[in-house]
Image (tube, coloured by chain):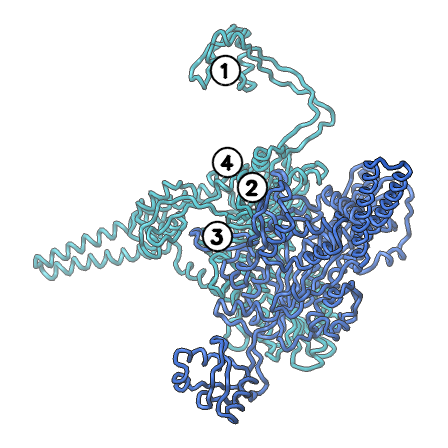
Chain colours: A cyan, B blue
Amino acid sequence: MAEESLRQAFVEKQAAVDAQGDVVRRLKEAGALKQEIDAAIEVLDGLKLQKSSIEEQLQAALGSNDGAAGREAFRQAVVNTLERRFFYTASFKIYRGVAGLYDYGPPGCAVKSNVLAFWRQHFVIEENMLEVDCPCVTPEIVLKASGHVDKFTDLMVKDEKTGTCYRADHLLKDFCNDKLQKDLSISAEKAAELKHVLAVLDDLSAEELGSKIKEYGITAPDTKNPLSDPYPFNLMFQTSIGPSGLSPGYMRPETAQGIFVNFKDLYYYNGNKLPFAAAQIGQAFRNEISPRQSLLRVREFTLAEIEHFVDPEHKEHPKYCEVENLEFLMFPREEQMSGQSAKKIRLAVAVSEGIVNNQTLGYFIGRVYLFLTGLGIDKNRLRFRQHLANEMAHYAADCWDAEIECSYGWIECVGIADRSAYDLRAHSDKSGVPLVAHEKFPEPIEVEKLVIAPVKKELGLSFKGNQKMVIEALEAMNEEEAMKMKADLDSKGEVDFYVCTLGENVVIKKNMVSISKEKKKEHQRVFTPSVIEPSFGIGRIVYCLFEHSFYVRSSKVGDEQLNVFRFPPLVAPIKCTVFPLVQNDKYNEKAKEIAKSLTEAAISHKIDITGTSIGKRYARTDELGVPFAITVDSEESVTIRERDSKDQIRVTVEEAASVVKSVIYGQRTWEDVWSRFPHHSSESTE
Amino acid sequence: MAEESLRQAFVEKQAAVDAQGDVVRRLKEAGALKQEIDAAIEVLDGLKLQKSSIEEQLQAALGSNDGAAGREAFRQAVVNTLERRFFYTASFKIYRGVAGLYDYGPPGCAVKSNVLAFWRQHFVIEENMLEVDCPCVTPEIVLKASGHVDKFTDLMVKDEKTGTCYRADHLLKDFCNDKLQKDLSISAEKAAELKHVLAVLDDLSAEELGSKIKEYGITAPDTKNPLSDPYPFNLMFQTSIGPSGLSPGYMRPETAQGIFVNFKDLYYYNGNKLPFAAAQIGQAFRNEISPRQSLLRVREFTLAEIEHFVDPEHKEHPKYCEVENLEFLMFPREEQMSGQSAKKIRLAVAVSEGIVNNQTLGYFIGRVYLFLTGLGIDKNRLRFRQHLANEMAHYAADCWDAEIECSYGWIECVGIADRSAYDLRAHSDKSGVPLVAHEKFPEPIEVEKLVIAPVKKELGLSFKGNQKMVIEALEAMNEEEAMKMKADLDSKGEVDFYVCTLGENVVIKKNMVSISKEKKKEHQRVFTPSVIEPSFGIGRIVYCLFEHSFYVRSSKVGDEQLNVFRFPPLVAPIKCTVFPLVQNDKYNEKAKEIAKSLTEAAISHKIDITGTSIGKRYARTDELGVPFAITVDSEESVTIRERDSKDQIRVTVEEAASVVKSVIYGQRTWEDVWSRFPHHSSESTE
């Protein structure tokens, strides 16, 4: 609202400045008195002052550009460190790279595999999930059934002269944002219109996008050439399976389909019991039109997906009580619609008030929260945002994204969706193999079934050629309609009946249809399970973790700025470094002894026997996020330094590896260790 | 030799039988005396008897068909168990599958990820390797440089009527094997010819393969239609990167290239020091013409590759002494050529005698041996086979395959190759980025360099248009040639010189070229490192592990055959099961308590509270290779059963998880535990 009235005021003040400018000019032309002219100029200056005051307020309301610049500078600092220390790099760099493809170098690869190992522990092992491993190469029929062949597209426009491709919605989005941020002279109405476009961007059809692009005169960003109309581009990498060239295939866009097509075997493996969850970690591929935002939008990425199959009538979860008291930032649909922001909600409240659709969905939201914060994601920059009605697939019962805030804004890192029975039904239909579950009743139960039996002879006599449509309409009645008709026929003998395929009422007589309820014994219920799907974009989580872990501190000596990643030991690429304080055969020997014990304890470590100053060696490994450093400064005892506090304790050579091990495996905290071993002070070393 | 003379004898005896048959027939036609005919028949019968005796001996010499049938039956038993218990299955089965693509179900996936975790521990962590993670999608230029675009092909033939594709060498191989095994009437010469074809199969050109197929009259196996000439089919899955359709790409056929193109950054990351090793685990893709042998030849598979970069002048390895005393089956080139079999050799002997090219190669052979036997591969069915000269790439210095024997024969599971500088040079040339290492000399050293300076003016006068070729030939002389020419010119004034590009001798005079040696100071040596590459086919290792771990035993009661996988705890998909002996709330409660402790210790387990008999529950989990079962038969104490011995000990409820944990993590052996806890006998339970 503030922004709107400020825009209004700005436009009005600009008009007033222009008008007063005209007054001054006309006075000058007419050769008016200097006194008169000066007075008019004074008014003009006053108006200009007021205008620039409004301009300042408006810029402040639009979100300080300083903030954006700060975020940009922070990102540059993180990315520089990440690339310099080879956490990641553009793939195939010596051949000038390929947009949207990245390599993880040694520390990045270690962080990623630590994240995956924790994921496996936290979800697969803890929950006894059924992990599977399916190929990336997928035949067309599977992705036809899932809808990807027809609908997994983005709208694309081409530079009409050079043929360069752009995502149509990106161009429109950039145009609107740019206009809103930089053009202060647009009217409040225009601003509102642009904001509306941004809000409905994901819902626009090719035609709507095209006409907006034309209306706003948007051209190719690089050349200013005109653009083609938008048309859909399928985002799957296509290939051909086998030598014949006759079997089209795709690189899977998600891992989930591999689980769905195996439902029958998985259900059998689980003793034909529900609920159970299957899980898969693997590569997925999306041939993005124009990849952006480094690791956040890439053409190949690692997904970790869970498909939890559940009886749609029993979405409670036995371990729900373990997470229900968690409280964290949630952003329900209603708060988004009414312009509020995310707020802390206790999970139990969200579930019991129906904000979150069911217990199982709630359970996974809680588990995802524990997973992400366990990795080191800042809980104040993590929120669970509910999908708006227009974002959700028509079949989905409810959907929440775990969004993490980083320098690019709030980024969807985990999607947690109740997809109902959609996927299993789609594959049942396409393959002809029923993907269903059974619930055996303890005893056969008697059910009443509605039986509608049209009497064809009578109907034929009355309706001739229309007979078939009348019969279909009768048979399509639900229980309520049928019982009402039965009652009416019993009481009145005939009844008016609307046949939608004929578009008119017909008269049904008592002898034309028999309606009754019959009792039947049923031994089991056959149904398609619902699936609740938490889907993790591992690369996105890793990137956000990099940003949340990064900070800069000054060195004690000199004014150098030192970079640190505060990775928890669980995630740290290297858990421990071993430094002989000075170059010396005896110290080197002790360092190697300690390194050997660390190897035996399966603790990844690095030994650095260069003569570099110990302060520099600490700084070097702080930049890799190594949580502990063992420095050999005597033959009997060594120091252990903790990265963030820079505190050091003294332990014997023999103890060193086991103390580090106990902290890394979470058997003790650093505070524990700190209170039990002598402290070592080393003002001079850093 | 036995086979050869038996074939000869068989053919001769067959001829004798035929001739005597003619004799009998002619006697009958001529109305000879019954006595005379009977005598001739008696001779014939004698010859037939002799023939079938030779036939038997020949069949025995060809390798008993019983053996082949036994292997086939064993494989069927393993594969049935693997598929029934969902270790793996054909991918996309509900859509009738795709040849060469398999899904790992829960136990198979767990085995595979345990193998990979051990690989990471045994190689990456133990050796401080630099692990990287690069995309599967690869632009064409990278695979052009590596040679895959031009040479990664198999020769294919097509059924000329139906268009069905076959691998040309497979058809020829099948024909030869079939003929040798089943057609006893072929001559010894013919048999030798077919064996020769099998031996040189991999070296045959398209033309040679085609002419053999024609000569033998080989037709399409399914239809007996004629076949096309063989032509190369590239085995890479092709795709297109980005929306333009102008950037061809492939799914990588190996992970190694991702490491090579990052050499510069890796070398820098390692402090510009050699040697170091980089490693990568990931998917690789080969669009096989006709996949066979289930998990052994597939279209998508997991590779784990190591590229160990080393100074070509220093191929010693600091940790070589840790493996040099290992002794295992090796199959050097010479033993293969002279028809001997693999023999046990101590690694130190193989390296010092030059059978294995260098220490580093030897070190990795030893480490691979420890890795595979650590997983549970039978060391008597594991051999290291050296590549023959014709198998090896021209640039390779030496190459050994770790081959594991399974029901399909000896299968290459790990390749360990010294690829010299080939790969780095290829990418340096193509990209223009030098992928080299530097060795700084402690002090600058003086080197003598050969300088050949052709005198263009004089050469131009004498050779006119051929001048350029003469100059090139002069400059291309090596030191020895140049110094000889210098001596000859000094003594004789002129010399005959062969210019290969001209194909003739020319006369070089003293004034046409100046040859000298100059001294220069050099500060460092710049060189392309050699790379030693151990490359692991994880799926093949896993399949062989399944076969080596499988056995059948009889149940105590009844005659049932029970299947067991004797996986070591390291590899077992589930480490422990928890069974309440009878259905009972108190026992169930205790079982859940124990399960919780196992979860906390990160031990994958399964709790089975079905009322099934305990014997059946044991049998069920033996089939999954679960090494330990905890049975709750009281509220205070429980039993722990070891899978292979079926021995049981009794421990308290509180101890149960920690005892299992200590054995699983190798802190104690089962023998240890067996000697320290009371035994429990349970004749009746199994």
Q: Which mark is residue B240?
A: 3
Return the residue nearer the eye: A246 or A156.
A246
Disc 2 target residue: B161
Q: Which mark is residue A394?
A: 4
Q: Nearer the viewer, mark 3 or mark 4?
A: 3
Disc with the residue nearer the chain's start (1 vs 4): 4
The residue that disc 1 covers is: A468
Which amino acid type is shown beneath numbered disc 1?
Answer: Lys
Q: Whole-Å distance between the Cαs marked 1 and 4?
A: 32 Å
Mark 4 vs mark 2, foreground winner is: 2
Q: Amino acid at mark 2?
A: Lys
- The chain identifier of the residue carrying mark 4 reads A
Q: Earlier in the sequence, mark 3 or mark 2?
A: 2
Question: At which x and y percent is residue A196?
Answer: 38, 43
Identify which residue is drawn at 39% across, 42% down. A206
Q: Residue lying furthest left in this view?
A: A31
Label 2 crowd bin: few (<14), some (14–19), many (20+), radius 10 Å = few
Question: Along the line of sight, which residue is nearer the eye, A318 or A214?
Answer: A214
Q: Secondary structure at mark 2?
A: loop
Which is closer to the viewer, label 1 or label 4? Answer: 1
Q: Do callouts 3 and 1 point to residues on the same chain?
A: no
Could you tell me if residue B262 is visible in this image? yes
- For the residues labelled 3 and 2, the Cα–Cα distance comes to 31 Å
Q: Is residue B20 left or right of residue A271?
A: right
